[in-house]
Amino acid sequence: MNANTLRGTAALTALVALAACSSGGSNNDPSLVGVARQTLTQAVAQRGQAAEPAAPRDPAKMAATALSVNPGPLILVGLEGMGTTEVLAMTGQNGGMRTYMTPNEQAVILRGGMLVGTRGLGHDMSATDASQSAALIRAGQSGQARRTLRYYAADGTERPLPFTCTIGPGPKAGVTIESCEGNGISFQNNYAVSGGAISVSRQWGGPGLGYLTIQTLRP
């Protein structure tokens, strides 16, 4: 087994470790444990393809292949609601904000490991101001924070959702939990932090998009 394969497998193992720290989230969302197990075994064929079922893709092999052919920063993203997993490569950076994209131009935007936007996924997050949460999470500190999530509603209108969040340590060392409430909605984000950097996370992308698991393959 070469180094790239080992790195890809290690990335998925980290998702399982973080999954054990999840205490749930919003109703009707599968647990991160289930998603991580599914990620380790198969990526479900995308919806809408009616003919013969597509052969499941092994995320560890996807990660290893991406690491071998792309020298730049890479992340592995799982969409819980869609049951899909993809490797995304960084296509642009503006200050601390990084845009990662699939070949078909679906994008995830991160700032220091925090999810701040998506494009092309449906029910996209337009932008998020989570600077207060981010500072506490990366410092490993507990406290209260406010964040505002902006997402595109079904009619294409951008809607702001303000939340009040409580940040504190999770049940395992190195994991921080962010529990947020507002507008009759509650969600819980989980972050694995190492050396002040977010390496693995499960983050809520909005009412329609749901949770994303994000793993850094190459920083």
Image (cartoon, rainbow, N blue to C red):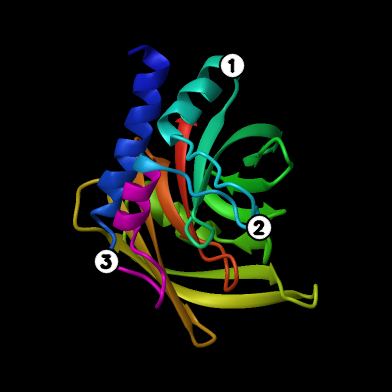
The residue shown at (23%, 54%) is 20
Residue contact at pointers 1 and 2, CB within 8 angstroms: no
Q: Which mark is residue 69?
A: 1
Identify the mark nearer the N-term, 3 or 2. Answer: 3
Q: Where is residue 114 drawn, in percent x and y? A: 52, 51
Q: Amino acid at mark 1?
A: Val
The residue shown at (68%, 62%) is 124
Q: Nearer the viewer, mark 1 or mark 2?
A: 2
Q: Is residue 16 above or below residue 68?
A: below
Which residue is label 3 attached to?
Answer: 23
Q: Which mark is residue 48?
A: 2
Q: Residues within 10 Å of mark 2 (few under 14, many from 20)?
A: few
- Which element type, helix, strand or loop, lies under badge 1? helix
- Res. 219 in view: no
Identify the mark nearer the N-term, 1 or 2. Answer: 2
Q: Tell me the CA gap for discs 1 and 2.
A: 29 Å
Q: Which residues are magenta?
A: 24-39
Q: Residues within 10 Å of mark 1 (few under 14, many from 20)?
A: few
In front of the other: 117 or 103: 103
Q: Tell me the CA gap for discs 1 and 3.
A: 37 Å
Residue that extends furthest to the front in the rendered view of this protein: 52
Q: Is residue 25 magenta?
A: yes
The residue shown at (59%, 16%) is 69
Residue contact at pointers 1 and 3, CB within 8 angstroms: no
| Horizontal relation, residue 184 to residue 169: left or right | right
The residue shown at (60%, 22%) is 72
Q: Is residue 201 above or below residue 69?
A: below
